[in-house]
Image (cartoon, rainbow, N blue to C red):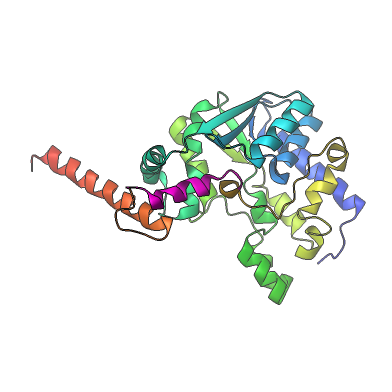
Amino acid sequence: MKQKFTKNDALEFRKICLERIEEIDAARNAALALSGGTDSMTILFAMLETGRKPECYTFYMDGILSKDLKASRYVCKFFGLNLHEIKVPADVDSIYKDVKRVLPYCEYVKKTIIQCMVPWLYIYPSVTEKRIINGIGGDDLYATQRKLRVKFAKFGDDAVIAERRFYGRDLRFSEANILRFAKEYRKENVDFYESEKMENFLKQFSLKTIIKPYDKYPSLAAFSDYYSKGSFYRDQTEHSYQINSKLRDCHDELLKSKYNKNSSKAIIGIYNLIAKEIGNERQCKSKGKMGI
């Protein structure tokens, strides 16, 4: 396992990224789901390097100017790109309705899945392109999950190497549910990081090597010329998009609302209650159809 990431490695990773864009956007008309974090910025820089100027889409919670929104505005203005800012309702009544709308499309009643799915209720209908590229799987290949970083700190690379892989087709996790949900809108959502070549390349290096001196260092090194043009880098110790956007905080407001009928102390309790209500409604509809 390599303990150093060299300039030649950076050039090789850049080549892999450029090849990946050509592979998934051969028609050169895909849109980009942009958050302004390293994963989506890597995709953007690969698209720009290959002469593409994608339509960019980002979401924000109504009334909240998030870091994602500010970063997306900054980079799109800098490179002269169109940014579509998609508003997601933040009031508890709308959040309750959105959770109820999205739950039938979630494989599991799991907090991260539900919260990550909700913005796509608004993103998918807003995207005019048939294909949208996302970078959610970057966290998988860079093993940013807290439990893996703790495991690595205690036991080293051998303990986490098997888990440094792409989870985007595993319906126990949010991304697979998001990708599948696209079909409901006759869209195709493609993860840039679903690449065996990219995965094998990154797994050559110890985890310490690719998170030093900066987290997700290979992506930064591969497109250092683009990063040098402006203030595009965001500290990757920041949190996931449901936290950065304050989506999680908005959902937690349900705990103080009339929808917390069982006085749950955790939001998953409300999600489970809504799931049960949906199940009961389905049964009632079925009984009605049977004349019961």
Q: Please, is residue 234 above or below residue 75 in the view?
A: below
Residue beneath the point at 82% across and 42% down: 15
Which image quarter: residue 190?
Answer: top right
Instruction: Name the residue furthest right.
Output: 7
Q: Please, is residue 206 above or below residue 245 in the view?
A: below
Which image quarter: residue 132?
Answer: top right
Instruction: Name the residue furthest front.
Output: 256
Drawn side of residue 71 relative to residue 90, left or right: right
Q: Nearer the viewer, residue 203 or 26?
A: 203
Q: At which x and y percent is residue 96? A: 37, 42
On whether residue 256 falls in the magenta region, the answer is yes
Q: Nearer the viewer, residue 246 or 17?
A: 246
State the quadrant of the N terminus. Answer: bottom right
Q: At which x and y percent is residue 220? A: 81, 47
State the quadrant of the C terminus. Answer: top left
Which image quarter: residue 60?
Answer: top right
Residue beneath the point at 48% across and 50% down: 113
Q: Main secondary structure of the magenta part?
A: helix
Per the rendered image, the range of residues in magenta is 244-258
Drawn side of residue 82 relative to residue 225, left or right: left
How many numbered discs sit on the rendered protein? 0
Residue beneath the point at 36% across and 59% down: 264
Drawn side of residue 143 relative to residue 255, left or right: right
